[in-house]
Image (cartoon, coloured by chain):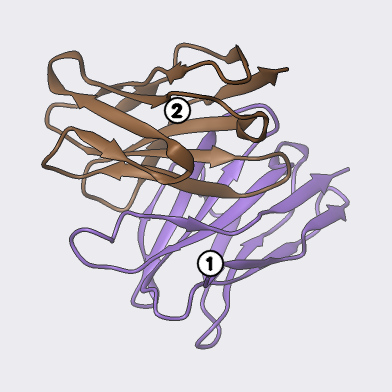
């Protein structure tokens, strides 16, 4: 079964450093997302991406964050100047598109970010 | 703004017993409704979804959920729980846009 692949599975970084989290969505999916889950808390929407541009973003997704689809397969989340509170599990997700499938998210296993 | 409430932070059920996890949403119309499951260290897996039509929907692993418009609820049920069902369960809603909103989750413990 096709899956969403995320790397790295775990990254430890120093406060102030830049981090890039990578995702390979399912190949025929059109919409891409990043969510995050701070330990013990709910899963929160960060950003959605379609047709090479951001389609929606949350208030969490400020200028510190950026997303990119550098080629036909990868989808990245860059966090500039990381802060302690950025420590979380970051999930990439993708959806097919279309009226009945556009909202059915397929998640990756997540990238755990620890900021020291 | 839409919201999702899962009133039970955790639930403990004996293996073989029935299960019901509660979910209520706040939205003016009927949203798209989902239940996802997250096993420790794993991503979220879709259990089932409701878009329209029959208000009782069947999902994977023997789960079902019933949409009740009058109660703004979408409760998840399973007639007989297995030890492997121990996980965290998230109810989620989407109102037709790009953002899916998740509840806080209910952690299910299964005792022998």
**In the depicted view, which residue is nearer to us: B17 or B36?**
B17
Q: Which chain is mark 1 on?
A: A
- Residue B109 pos. (x, y %): 66, 20
Q: Which chain is in brown here?
A: B
The hue of chain A in the figure is purple
Location of the C terminus of chain B (image quadrant): top right
Are tags 2 and 1 found on a single chain?
A: no
Q: Say which quarter of the image contains residue B66.
A: top left
Disc 2 crowd rating (10 Å Cα; few below 14, some 14-19, many 20+) is many
> Left or right: A10 with respect to B43?
right
Label 1: element kind = strand
Whole-percent x, y for residue A62 in the image? 52, 49
In the picture, the disc for residue A67 is 1
Q: Secondary structure at mark 2?
A: loop
Q: Residue furthest bottom?
A: A72
Vertical placement of B66 versus A44: above or below?
A: above
Above/below status of A74 relative to B10 = below
């Amino acid at each position: 079964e096709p899956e969403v692949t995320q790397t790295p599975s775990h990254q430890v970084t120093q406060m102030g450093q830049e981090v890039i989290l990578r995702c390979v969505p399912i190949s025929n999916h059109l919409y891409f997302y990043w969510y995050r889950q701070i330990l013990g808390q709910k899963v929160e929407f960060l950003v959605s991406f379609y047709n090479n541009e951001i389609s929606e973003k949350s208030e969490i997704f400020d200028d510190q964050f950026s997303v990119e689809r550098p080629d036909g397969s990868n989808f990245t989340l860059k966090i500039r100047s990381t802060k302690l509170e950025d420590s979380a599990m970051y999930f990439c997700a993708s959806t097919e598109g279309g009226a009945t499938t556009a909202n059915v998210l397929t998640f990756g296993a997540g990238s755990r970010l620890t900021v020291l | 703004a839409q919201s999702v409430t899962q009133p039970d932070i955790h639930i403990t059920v004996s293996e073989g017993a029935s299960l019901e996890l509660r979910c209520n949403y706040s939205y003016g119309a009927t949203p798209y409704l989902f239940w996802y499951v997250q096993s420790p260290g794993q991503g979220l897996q879709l259990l089932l979804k409701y878009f329209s039509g029959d208000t009782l929907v069947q999902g994977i692993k023997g789960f079902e959920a019933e949409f009740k418009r009058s109660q703004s609820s979408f409760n998840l049920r399973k007639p007989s729980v297995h030890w492997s069902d121990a996980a965290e369960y998230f109810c989620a809603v989407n109102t037709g846009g790009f953002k899916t909103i998740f509840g806080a989750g209910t952690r299910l413990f299964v005792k022998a």
